[in-house]
Amino acid sequence: MGAVAGLGGEFAVQLGKKEVVAAALPIQEHWLSLSNLDLLLPPVDVGVFFCYTNPTTTTASQRLGYGSMVGILKAALAQALVSYYALAGEVVQNSAGEPELLCNNRGVDFIEAFTDVELRHLNLYNPDETIEGKLVPTKKRGVLAVQATELKCGGIVVACTFDHRIADAHSANMFMVFWAETARSDAPISLPPSFRRSLLNPRHPLCVDRSLDSMYIPVSALPPPPPQKQKADEECETPTSRDDDCLVSRMYYVTAAKLSELQQRACSNGSKRSKLESFSAFLWKMVAESSSVATNDDNKTMSRMGIVVDGRCRLMSQGVDDKPAPMASYFGNVLSIPFGEKRAMEVVEKPLSWVAEAVHEFVESAATKEHFLDLIDWVEEHRPVPAVARIYCKPRSEQEEEEGSTAFVVSSGQRFPVTEMDFGWGKPVLGSYHFPWGGEAGYVMPMPSPLSNGDWVVYLHLSRSQVAFIESKAPTVFRPLTPHYLRLL
């Protein structure tokens, strides 16, 4: 089968045929600029995967082998790339030093693979061991890479890796559903994507809200690490402390009953809070408390949490003559990351309803049309210097850079289309994003259970010590994801 990948875990994945799948129809080579909101994304890749049982164990009238499934995936991908031609291109640097998309139909790397393990034996709780570098491909070229891995039981894992600068989760979801619909000839096809960058043009004259300086920062303005921290990192850090600070990925199953319980507690002051706000507030308390315990908090340790806000529905009215603009089908990044910053002990000691109120306030401040128009103008003012969200950087003042300070981002995956990813051999038994992005801030994405019962599958990327604390403090909320919850046993 060729080279062996993913050694060092409980199983290995053998890589087989690698093919470049291009759009089925010729594409006129052209350049597609990145929007100002795209330019806020660093060059990181995002993974997503879907697990399917052996089609021969289902009631499907047509029984498919691995070769047939791969053929369907490739043929549908080639057709889907005609509409989603940006995914068949490559990112290059323009004369200003900014990334730009060359739509040249170079194609998508498609990798076939095999592993001698059954789906029900995959350790889904620990994706660092079973998903990373094994079932989700490492993208080496282009914008998108795909891997289809045959399992010992006859099941299949279909996985993709995207360049985040080109697509946010909404865009990736659009493409994946379109791809699956294309594979099923009897399925209605979704609307094609819109690459109309003028929808996100800056205003003239620019109107910059200076409050955005507290949310985003040009990379040229990032302060260097404090000398004492550099020295500690180079000389004093022990292997144990490095292990505790290392970010790890874990997957959990959170029941609808627990989510309702958290929401009820978050609304105890009479305010109405969403399940996402309630869950995020609870997690913020857990992370803040873990840092307080680890550092014997002297009330100086800071804790920050951000929540990703999608601007599409906020910008929907930005059209000619106030007619709705086609933002729902817009392909690209339309995101902002507002965040809250509190003393860790304050987050720990205050009731969940108070923390949920704080979450609601900073999310609400960014959930407006004006916020996104201001953000577009803010980026324009700083170009061509790239900028990043401050939640990913140090606290606002160096005096607040205390050991144990924490930061993480929650991105709602409640629109993750796991039940729509049927290529013709049934719905997946599990689907999830996979984003061990390599930065120092954590990342959490709650997604709907494939059982469509109100439960959540939660991807969590936090430090090892934070994960250990959360599991010991809230074991009934964060239940390690096992095949039992997916009805594979």
Image: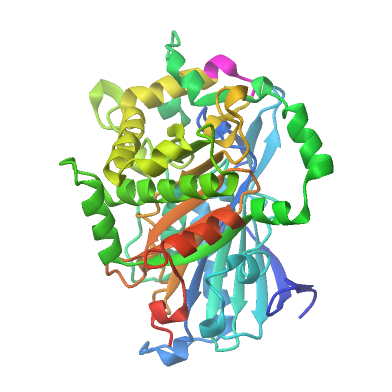
Residue 184 to residue 330: above or below: below
State yes or no: residue 262 in magenta. Answer: no
Decide which of 262, 424 is in the foreground and name it. 262
Q: Is residue 34 left or right of residue 474?
A: right
**Quadrant of image for the C terminus:** bottom left
**Quadrant of image for the N terminus:** bottom right
Q: Is residue 232 left or right of residue 70?
A: right
Within the image, what quadrant is residue 222 found in? top right
Is residue 78 visible to the viewer in this orientation of the structure? no
Residue at screen point 52% across, 27% down: 36
**Furthest-top residue in view?**
205
Decide which of 308, 106 is in the foreground and name it. 308
Residue 40 to residue 486: above or below: above
Residue 20 position within the rendered picture, expressed as x and y whole percent measured from the top left = 68, 61
Q: How many marks?
A: 0
Residue 214 to residue 261: above or below: above
Residue 206 position within the rendered picture, expressed as x and y whole percent measured from the top left = 45, 11
**Furthest-left residue in view?**
270
Decide which of 245, 364 is in the foreground and name it. 245
Residue 66 position within the rendered picture, expressed as x and y whole percent measured from the top left = 57, 83
Q: What colouring method underlies this structural image?
A: rainbow
Residue at screen point 54% across, 63% down: 250
Residue 207 to residue 189: above or below: above
Magenta-drawn segment: 380-385
Is residue 30 visible to the viewer in this orientation of the structure? yes
Within the image, what quadrant is residue 185 found in? bottom left
Q: Is residue 247 left or right of residue 241?
A: left
Residue 433 position within the rendered picture, expressed as x and y whole percent measured from the top left = 50, 58
Decide which of 248, 387 is in the foreground and name it. 248
State yes or no: residue 383 in magenta. Answer: yes
Residue at screen point 80% across, 43% down: 236
